[in-house]
Structures are given as structure tokens and as C-alpha cells.
Amino acid sequence: MAEVIGLVRNFYSSRRALLSPTELRSIGPICSALESLNYKRALLLSDQVLKRSPGDASALALKALALSVSSKPLPSSTQQDILEVIEAVKGGAGLGDADVLMILSYVLRGIDRGEMALELLTKATQLHPDNEELALEAFTQYMRSNDCKSAQLVSTKMSKRFKDDRYFWWSIMSTILQVRDLSHPQGELLLSLVERQLSTRFSAMLNAPTADSAGEKPTSASYASADEFHVVTRFLELRAQYAALQADSPNTSASISSTALVLPSLPSSDTPLSPAKALLAHFSSPEADKWCEQNLGLDLWRREAELAYGSAEGGEWKKLWKRLKVALEKGDINWHTMLYLTRAALAIAAGSSSTSTDSSPSPEGLDLLSQTRQLFRSLATESPRAKVERGYLLGQLEIARELRLRGWEAVDDLLALVKEYLERFGSKACCFDDLHPYLEILSDAETTDLHELLSEASEAELKTVAAATKVINARRVLRFLAKESTDAAQEKLEAEKHIKRYFDALPLGKELPPTELQPADDFALLAGQAYVSAYHLSHDRSYLERALIVLEHVLLRSKYKYQVRVLTINILRLLGASSAALAHYRIFSVKNVQYDTLSHIVMARGATFAIESGKDVGVFEEALATSAWYASGQREAREMVVKAFNNNALSKIEDFSEFRHRLMKSLQDGLRTLETLRMRVLRGVLDAVATDEAAQALKRLSEASAVSYSDNRDFKTLPNYQSKRSRQIWQQTEMGDRLDAVWLRAMASTYSRFFAPASEVPACEAPSSMTRAEAALLSFSRLAQVVLVAELAQAAEAEQAALVFFKDQAELFAATVDDPKSLSWEVLQIAEVTLEAFTLLELGINQRLGELAATKAADQAKHSKRLRAFRNSARDLVKPVGAKMTAYGKKVGKDRPKIVAAVADLQAFPAFDEDRITNVAHALVESRRSAAEALGSAMHRRTVK
């Protein structure tokens, strides 16, 4: 509603400058009513004004707005009223009013008629080509709807018709937004249009007199800002990318050179420059030097382009190397500078900027690598910043790593450099992350050597924070390099060692305020991961319960240690304690784009916990909050692009556009859509309108290709301290295999067969990411669809085949409950999928009967009777599973003494006395019991009749 209020206020503010006092008084009360959300009064006042002045465009626009927000969902009759109002505007003078069109565009987008809004704007600009405000509104709306082609056309006309210089650059950027996808069929043509526009502009500037007789400011043949330089650079880069694409394709001609391109940063020459050479010449110009000196982002871009498009023969790599060497000698400490100095030398040595290991090094390149290494060594030992600057030593490590990967003769001992780095910077929290890529390529002999050194370091005294950090890093490295363990008891012993060191280091943070993190926290994180590893080796659930007790204790002292909290959430979900996991998740206070990156923590297979007891809506509430953000987030992303244009922040436009694209194609958004639908189905909160909307969403999800998605989920929130030879900690603590686009499509297809039984759903096999229960549901959906659309004569056989699913699920449930190695989430999911299948079957029957009624099928009554009987047969098979689920809930509710006894060895640490362990066990058991009993009760309610 805040958006509507802002829209109305802006509209009224602009009307004050255009309307007479009498006209303003007529629409003022309507605007006030809309601001106070009194839509009925707004409609009444609008009708009163229109009764006196039927063609009043302002009143018509406000009436359309009032209608569009009068109720949710919007009835079809109201939508028809809105369209009639818009037709009235089109028949009057409203098409020449930008403010009116702004309101109408918003209304049409709100009723999913975005294309009609664009058609309205197109017609308006054609009728009023000299109306600058109207053209601005049209451009804005085109950008909001991501119609870059129309935006380009209107901005090109604006740049020719109006004097504002922004419109020229808007036209260029609108084209760039189209061709940034290198598969664009008209990419080269569009780039040639930009080339002509730029050349015309700068040719005129170069040929203009330095000053005219009227004493006006002379025209300078240069870029007016870093933004302009950025846009031209991006254009030249795209030309080079398209040319490279042509060269790699056997079906296209060679890349096109151009003599027509005129830019302040390109030398005047009759010799044609290839796109790559033009980009390199642009970056080697005085203009580039000026802007790159002022803007680090442009300078980094120049390095990347020179490395990608330069060559040893052309001298670009050598110039890059020299420039970066001078920068380091002058005190530059940017890691990017050190990295690209190394890469430039490697490119000269290999004769290619690729990471291929096939070539032999050139003498010149080896000499430059030697000079680079010597520079890093001298800076690491003699520079005033040598004691604090890690990059110099990392530069040497990078050279040693590349030489080893390429099979070239080593100059430095990689292991000696790793040891030196640990000695000098082991007290830095980032030490392990810095060394990670170099630890991965150590040989077994080097690993053994390093293990002996660090074993002693890992037992050092913890007298200071720096000493504790050094021990933590030693233990991280030891754990990462360790051979894959096969003994759970050994992992348990390792965990206990980490816990002891945690308590040894805890006094170091006793004076810290509660908002600060404890220096000892990572010892506990190491312990937690060791316990997880022990569980996977033994399938003894008590190891996860030990980890939970330790991590819960850590969070009492370090509330904001999010890595510990994420691991705690994952373990709680594995143990079936969803409500406890959600309590931790809510402490994050997820906001804005974090919904896209972090909501997967509790949303992945969230339907397993869709039903909670009492008034607690559980994960369903988080699903609704996430859904609400995606709606507002995509709207905000569109506005970010528009604001970037309006503020002429040309260098930011493509970034905002990319953000919008990634959000619109978000894999997590697709997973959220499906998971929320699953929860709605299970909770029985789908009405007719929501069912129709869901059917459309399912069709879209089941037809989307896997490559069309953008996976923005963040899995780096939980650092991996497991052995490099074993699975990572995220994989070890997820509920089943990680959800992906293939899983999404398969599950959407499953649902589509029930929401639209008569439709043809793309066939797909169960992907490996599906659990056993999910794969069975997919198979059941195929059989159920056959039952739903079967002829009377063939129905009996199809029904018996489909009912096997429920029998198998009942057997699987019983076996899983009796298996001591099974986890609670696995038990819950089998029962949840059983209920889900039955609920979908009921929905599918209703949908099928609706289809039969719509087609007036002759045997409608017989099919209705048959399908009801089939539903009852399925119900009779589901009902016992519900009873067993309830019994399971009562059983797990009595597990507290068993958990306390299983983890009794933790009482060796004074902090984990029996009371503390009992409290954690009680909270765990109550959460598990609540989830199990709520699901059992839901199954009973669903199958009671």
C-alpha cells in the first residue's frame, strides 16, 4: 500500500502545476481518500467528478487506481471495469498526459496486463512525439518491464528531438543491455548502430571549433565523466566478445574491422582495427590513464582486458607487467595487482592467458617470473609493511602453485612457503582460507611433513588471542589434510580435544561484551564438524546430539556467531526438530536479498515440517514472508534500474540489470514457489483462485530448462573443516541431496498431473537429488493421472496399480521407524509424502470432475462415483500410517532420558552438567514430538471420512 500512497502523492504534486484551482479541488478529495486507503469513497468521488466531466483524465486514472486496489483477489468484473476506464482515457486527451499514463501503467501491471500498458505508451508517444514528459514516462515504463528494445527506440528519438545529453547515453545503454547476452541474433547489427552513434557524436566534437564567436564554452573531444568512459569501454568489450565468438564458430565469417569508429581514446588511422585491437588501443590511451587513475574499478577492468585480449607479440602483457611492477614498488598493496602481475608473467611464459598446462615456458616468461618472485621476496622481507601484508608471500605461493600445476620446473619449495606463511601469519583469522588453494595440491609426503609440524603447534598454550587463533588455524589445516577417517571413535576423540581447547581458550574473551564473538568459538565449530563426521561413519544419532549440546552452549556466549548457528539449524532439522531450528533462523532477522540467498536453510524440503501443532504456523510463515519479499524485491530491482538511468549512473545500470535478471531467474524463487505450494496443499489452504494460479505456475516450472535458472543460494555461510577427501559439511548436514533445477522440474511435473489431469505433462525420470519417498511420489503421479483420465473399462486395473504406492509407503514407514540408524526427518518425510499424495489425489479428483463437467461428459456421474470410491480405497491405506505417526510422536516424546544417557560422556566437561544436557535434550524432544504428533493429527483429520 505504501507504493500506492507514494504514487498518489506524486500524481497530486504534479497536478498542482498543471490544473486550475477548480480542477485541483475536484481531484484533491479523491487523492486524500486513496491515501487513507478508503477505496469505496475514492470510487464514489471519482464517479461524481466523471458525472460532471466524463472525459476528465485525472479522475479516470484515479478511478482505475481505486478499482485496482479495492479488493484482493480482483474479480473479473472489476478488471473489466478497469479496462473500460482505460478505453475512456484512450478516447480522450489522456494519452498526452504523462502523469495519467503513469497511473494507468501501474494499474495494468497490477492486473497482469503489462503488454497493454506498453501498447498504451507506444500509441501515446506516436500521437505526441514532441511531449518530452510523455517520452520520459514511456522510457521509464519500458525499462521497468525490461523491454530494452522499445526503450532504445524511444531514447534514440529523444536524443534527436530534445536537448538533454542524457538521452544519447540512455540510447547507448539500452542497446548494451540487449546485446550483453552474446546469443542475441541481432547483436552485431545493434553494435554497428552504437558504433555509428558514437562516431557521429565524437566526430562532431573533434571537428568543432575550439570556441565560437559568442564566447561559449569550447567543445572538448574527450569523455565528460568516468561513466561515459565506462559505457564506451563496455561497447568496445562487447564488440571484441562478438568477434571472438565469430572466430570460434565455423559457420560465420571472420570478425569485422572498422575504420569508421571515431573515439577520443582511439588514434586516428586509416588502418582498420579489429575489435580486440580497438579495445586494447582504447585502454592504452591517455584518456584511459586519466580515468583509470581516478577509478580503481576501471583500472581492474583494464588489467583483465589486457590479459584476455593482449598477446606477447603485441606487447600488451609486457606493458601490463611493467605497469603493475611499478605500482607494487610504489607501495600498492592490492592483491589484484599482485595476482595480475603473476598472471601477466605466466601468460608471457606460456604464450597464452589461458590456464592450459600443455605448453613449455618461454625463456622471456621464465625470466619475468623470476623477477616477479624476487620482487615478492624482497617486499616480503624488506618492505615496511612486510610484517602485516600477507599478499607478498601469497604472491610467491601463487607462482609456486602455477608452476606445479603446469608441470614447469619449480623455483621455490611450495611446502617451505606454506610453513613460512603459517609461521608469519598463522595468528590471522583468515590464514586457513588464504592457504586453502595451496594446501589442496600438496603431495602425500608434503602433507605428512606438514602434519608433524602442526601437530605440535596445535597443542600450544593459549595465553593470548593471537596464540589461540594460531592453534585454531593449525587444527583447521590438520583436519583438512587428514586422511578420510573410517573410525567414528577417532572422530569422537578429535571432537573432545577441540572441546577441551574451547574451554581452555574461553577465558580470553571473558571481558568482551555480549555482542562480541568469543576467540574460542572455532574450536567448537571444529568439534561440531568432527561429531557430524562421526555420525556419518557410524549412523549413531547420539553424535549429532552431542554436537547440538556443544553448539547450543557456544551460542549462549556468542549469540552472533552465525556459522555455529547455521550448523545448529542443520542438525536440528536432521533430528526432526523444526520449531527449534526456526527459532534459531529467526534470530538472523533475514532481510531483503538475504531471502534469496539464505532462506534455503529452512525452506529446503520445508514441506516435511509444513504442519505444526497449535497456533504455531512453523516454516509456512517463513515461506509466506519469503514469497512476499520476492514480489517486492523484484519490484525494487526494477526501480533500481530506472533510478540508475534517471540519476545518470551509467556505470551502475548493467550491474542493477544483472541483479534484476538473477532475481527474476532465481532458482531459490522457483524452489520457494513449489515448496510454498506443497505446504498450502498439505495445510488445505488452497482456494479456487489460488488453484488456478498454481496450475499456471506449475506449467511454467515444469517447462523451464535447468540452464535458465540462476542459483543465488549462499552455501559459504558454513565453513568446511572436513577432510578434503570427504564430503563437505553442507552436504553432510542437508536433508537429502541438494535441491537443484532438475529436482524442481521433476516435482513441478508431479504436481501438474494433479492440478491439470487432462493436460500433457513433460515426462521426466526421478533425478538422483530426489529422496526415495519423493521418487515414489513422482511415479505415483503418473499412475494417478492414468486413473483420473481412464475410461470406465480400463479404470480398475489402473487403480490397483496406483494403490500400490500407499502400500509401499506404509511398509517403508514401518521399516524406517524400526531402523535405529534412521533420523527423525526421514520418518517425518515418508509420512508427509504419504499425506501429500493423498491430498493431491483428492485435489486431482476435484479438478478432473471439474473438467468433466466443463465438457459435459456423458459418463460424468459414473466417473464421479468411481473416483470417489478410489479415493476411499486410498484413504483406508493412509489412515494406519497416520495412527503410527501419532504413536511415533508419543514415543519420541519419551526419549529425553535416552538422549541424556547417550551423551553422558560430555559431563566430563564441567559446563555440560546433567542439568544443562537435560535442558537441551528436553527442548529437542519437545520440538520433535510436536512435529510428529501434529503430522499424525493432520493425517487423522484428513482420513477421518
Image: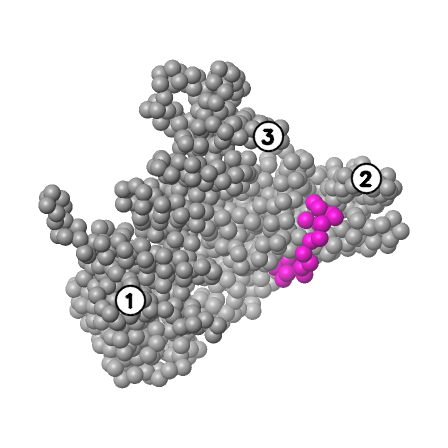
Which numbered tag is attached to residue 856?
2
Q: Mark 3 points at which residue?
A: 80
Q: Determine the secondary structure under disc 1.
A: loop
Q: Is residue 79 left or right of residue 852?
A: left
- Where does the image place residue 882, in percent across and percent down from the top left? 74, 43
Q: Quadrant of residue 422?
A: bottom left
Distance between mark 3 and mark 2 Cα atoms:
28 Å
Question: Which residue type does callout 2 highlight?
Answer: Lys
For residue 922: magenta?
A: no
Measure how far apart labels 3 and 1 are at the Cα level.
Answer: 57 Å
The local secondary structure at tag 2 comes to loop
Q: Give the range drawn in magenta.
A: 752-773
Q: Could you give the CA–CA distance between mark 1 and mark 2, rounded to whole angstroms?
A: 70 Å
Q: In the picture shown, does residue 386 fall above or below 584?
A: below
Q: Determine the main secondary structure of the stretch shown in magenta.
A: loop
Above or below: residue 85 compared with residue 376: above
At label 3, the amino acid type is: Gln
Q: Which of marks 3 and 1 is in front?
A: 1
Q: Which mark is residue 259?
A: 1
Residue at 22% in and 77% down: 371
- Work out whether 531 lies above or below 690: below
Residue 300: give its label. none
Residue for point 83% across, 53% down: 798
Dot placed on the residue nearer the N-terminal end, 1 or 2: 1
Is 381 on the left or on the right of 90, as rendered? Answer: left
